[in-house]
Amino acid sequence: MWWDIVPVSGDPEINPLPTLWFEEALDTMRQILNIPHVACQESAIHGLGHWYYRHQHRVSRILNAYILSGRGLRAGLHTYALNARKGGIL
């Protein structure tokens, strides 16, 4: 996936980008979860899972809202989102 090869991580020690950049990236992933396309949602979940270790609270809030919305149930992404909430994306 794109998140596995993009040279940007959620780690400010590796990527000295402004905090606003990280907030915008997380918000973009949150918005992608609203796109009614399984591949888009799966990619956003995957990206959030990668960012969990440096942005635990924000990632958990985003994925909790997604899980509670029920959008991933039909697409089979519910379990993937549950695991990504804790950084488990493999």
Image (tube, helix red, strand yellow):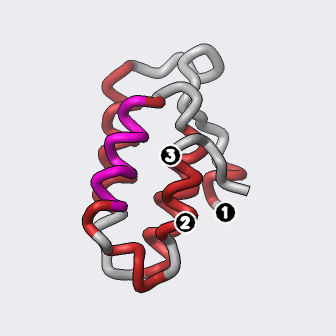
**Where residue 5 sits in the image (x, y, percent)?**
71, 51
Residue at which label 1 appears:
1
- Specify the label residue 51 is tagged with: none
Report the mark closest to the observer, 3 or 1.
Answer: 3
Left or right position of 74 against 14: left
Classify 10 Å Cα crowding around label 3: few (below 14), some (14-19), many (20 and above). Answer: many
Q: Give the residue displayed 33% in from the left and 32% down from the top.
A: 23
Q: Which residues are magenta?
A: 57-67
From what the image shows, is residue 20 above or below residue 45? Answer: above
Left or right position of 85 against 7: left
Q: Give the residue displayed 28% in from the left and 53% down from the top.
A: 65
Viewer-closest of 75 and 29? 75
Residue at which label 3 appears:
85
- Which amino acid lies under the numbered mark 2 shown in the image of this protein? Thr
Q: Give the residue displayed 36% in from the left and 61% down from the top.
A: 67
**Where residue 75 sits in the image (x, y, percent)?**
46, 83
**Where residue 7 sits in the image (x, y, percent)?**
66, 40
Is-magenta flag for residue 63? yes
* Predominant SS along the magenta part: helix
Give how far apart the Cα atoms at labels 1 and 2 are: 18 Å
From what the image shows, is residue 32 above or below residue 14? Answer: below
Quarter where residue 57 is shown: top left
**Total marks placed:** 3
Give how far apart the Cα atoms at labels 3 and 2 are: 10 Å
Q: Secondary structure at mark 3?
A: loop
Residue at which label 2 appears:
79
Viewer-closest of 52 and 35? 52
